[in-house]
Amino acid sequence: MEVIKSGLESVKGGGCPCICSTGWSGADTMGLETGDCAFNCGCLAATTQANLAANCAKASGEPCPVV
Amino acid sequence: MNKKTKYLVSYLSNLWGTKKPVAKLFRTNSGYYLYDTGTSKVLRCKFHVYELLNLLFSEEISTAISSFKAEHGEKIFEDVSADIIKAIDTEGILSSMGATRFGSGDHYANIEELVKSSLGMITLEITENCNLRCGYCIYNSYNENAREHSKTEMCIEVALKGIDYLKKNSHKKDRVAITFYGGEPLLRFKFIQRCVEYARSTIKEKKIDYSITTNGTLLTPEIARFFRKHNFSVVVSIDGPKEIHDSFRKDTKGKGSFQKAIQGLKTLIDIYCQDASEKISLSMVYTPPYSRKRLDRIASLWDELPWLPADLNVNMTYPSTGTFPYEHFSKDELNEDVDMRMWGAEKFKKKYSGVEKGHPISNSQEELKLAAFMQRKIFHSPEDRYFLNGCCVPGVRKLFIASDGTFRVCEKISFNAPTIGNVFTGIDLHIIKSIYIDSYEKLSLPACSRCWAIRLCHVCYIYAFEDKNLSLRRKSVGCRAELDAKERLLNLFSVLTENDLSGLDYLYSYKLQ
């Protein structure tokens, strides 16, 4: 069985990788948008962990707690 | 039972207990696949793996293995068994027995703070009046879940209070949005100007994105220039070439509106110039008599109007449930030789394989769906966290302000659904928490917990209300359509990757609205 490449891998194996404490993760499911997350980090559009970290820090004003 | 059989039975029994994993097996003309709900991964399988999994999902484990071996023999069973165990161990698949909860509890602990700090958009219903009487309008007498057209208009105090509310409750956002909605909002252009002027003078520290949904018939160069100046996004409702558009989009005297609407659209596109494709989009409603011929005819609008940008964003839908007098059509006219979505997928496949250059309708529709799929979250191992289907967070991402100032979750939700506050007294968190979160979860979880599409689901509050109450019966209508749509999406995704495995990678950078 071979995984077909698609999807953005969760950094922590579940939950919004940018900051789970808010609970609002646009990244957790399609159908929700980044605006649903308190930090609006843009994780839905982020394709790499580096982007995630940069976006999270920018949006929250704090260093990304994950990456 | 030999050693290898015993091992697989023991392995799967330990993993699954008496349940079956939540997953979806599907196939294309040339491939066999598994979508695993726990991890949200898609895996391509060999035929025999597909066969054994199919048996394991429907029968008791040892019975399934016996049936498989009787059909395919011991050697194939051993290979397939090893393949499945390896995939479970390395990819974390086939290990979710279903959701035990939706993402409430801790996840909703911050809602009060979010509502007060992170509001992203308000939609102002500035008038209930409209200069058209479209045959499928949600605001018609066929629809028990919506108001009818009326002369009711939003007063300026309500609009300004709405803008104040947006400012006050968005301090964590660096940009906010204001949408003008109706009825036909351009019946009140001066009102829109006043709102924009007030928003600009009030919300100085943020970028404001404006948008409007219009039938286009009242668009003038003056209005288009105003929109351009303030960088409005404009959605214009056009159903297709004249005879198709005019069959449903008529004015109050029953006269077709195509000519005026197209004139308005042309004015807008001319004035937006190179920004037209980014800021202007079409909303098309696909109406009976349904047929491939009719879809092709709708698509020919771009041939008839060479000035229409080829990369225009288009959203084409069927008439909303409950709004349409289907009884006016014969069975033949409602039977589809090709479904609208299938038609779009076929066109997109041809574009993907280089046979055709693509069409704005199918490109918009299919790319959006595929991009959302490509950008979904996948997991190393099953995670028992699921969100409330595709529901937004009421009062956070957006807020619909009706003409009388009441707050609603959005413009598409049943008119009888509970309101969530008003511009005078503010948001009603109790209603949001008790109805839109707790009751919704309680209603949905039994049905959703073992649904293979739970991580891909777009069903939301729009589909959940019947009259004033949450209704599983009403929601199940949306669920069936959603399951069908997601099965098609998986199929489309798989067929495209059979053609070119990395050809969809560009969708990782597609901006989801």
Image (cartoon, rainbow, N blue to C red):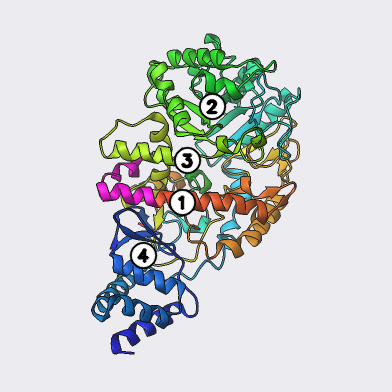
Q: Are marks 3 and 4 in contact (CB under 8 Å)?
A: no
Q: Which label was assigned to residue B339? A: 3
How packed mark 2 is, by other alpha carbons closer than 10 Å (few <14, some 14-19, many 20 or more), is: many
Q: Nearer the viewer, mark 1 or mark 3?
A: 3
Q: Are marks 3 and 2 on the same chain?
A: yes
Q: Earlier in the sequence, mark 3 or mark 4?
A: 3
* Residue that mark 4 sits on: B380
Magenta segment, principal secondary structure?
Answer: helix
Q: Does B2 sit left or right of B217 as displayed?
A: left
Q: Nearer the viewer, mark 3 or mark 2?
A: 3
Q: Earlier in the sequence, mark 1 or mark 3?
A: 3
Subunit bearing disc 3: B
> What amino acid type should be assigned to the residue bearing mark 4?
His
Residue B497 lies in magenta, yes or no? Answer: yes
> What amino acid type should be assigned to the residue bearing mark 2?
Tyr
Subunit bearing disc 1: B
> What amino acid type should be assigned to the residue bearing mark 1?
Lys
